[in-house]
Amino acid sequence: MDQALKTMIDNMPEKTGKSLDEWKKILTKEAFEKHGQAVKYLKTEHGVTHGFANTIVLLSKEENQSSEDLVETQYKGKEVLIPIYETLINHLQSLGNDITITPKKGSVSIIRKRQFVLIKPATKSRIDLGFKLKDKPVEDRLGDSGPFGTMCTHRVMISEVSEIDEELKGWIQEAYEQSV
């Protein structure tokens, strides 16, 4: 477990009024078909902030499936993309110890106080990197959000490790700084 997630779990009782285990018990009493329904329930019925609600739901669903399993499943048949993914994760972790890396079924969210980057293996030869960047114009390489919709404001398509260059790292840094 990365340090940011551990810190978030440790702070959960103070910030939400209950421990992760207590929240998991609450969720087991409800039957939610979709992730978003459970998050909405925690936010509306229990006043939990989005970041904590999302983390609680993910961790309660993933109790039987580890983060490594989720990432491994995403890249099954797309193993050529793993070096790109690992390079991105290594760079993101270097930004600070306040980052939570949250693997989901089809993507990995990178969260500070809110999600600022989303990593998704889009095809067998390409990762789509989504960003939350305020007031940033769309350019050739820094395209619109595409299939990410409102989850991101921009998207960069990456097919090789060499494309994780200073320009891309600059956009990652900018998104990180805006996510406070």
Image (cartoon, rainbow, N blue to C red):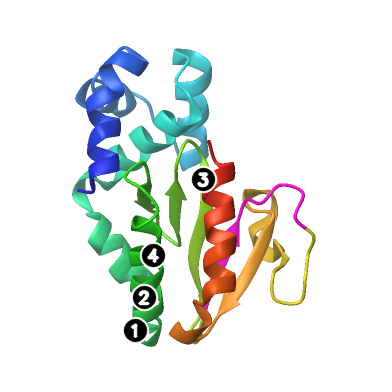
The residue beneath circle 3 is: 115
Q: Does the magenta run of residues contain 116?
A: no
**Disc number lying in front (4 or 1):** 4
Q: Is residue 83 left or right of residue 1?
A: right
Quadrant in which residue 11 is drawn: top left
Residue found 42% across the figure and 30% down from its top: 53
Q: CA distance from mark 3 to mark 4?
A: 16 Å
Q: CA distance from mark 3 to mark 2?
A: 21 Å
The residue beneath circle 4 is: 91
- Residues 52 and 11: in front is 11
Counting residues from the start of the chain, the first of labels 4 and 2 encountered is 2
Label 3 environment density (alpha carbons within 10 Å; few <14, some 14–19, many ≥20): many
- SS of the residue under disc 3: strand
The residue beneath circle 2 is: 75
Counting residues from the start of the chain, the first of labels 3 and 2 encountered is 2
Tags 4 and 1 in contact by the CB under 8 Å rule?
no
Tags 1 and 3 in contact by the CB under 8 Å rule?
no
- SS of the residue under disc 1: helix
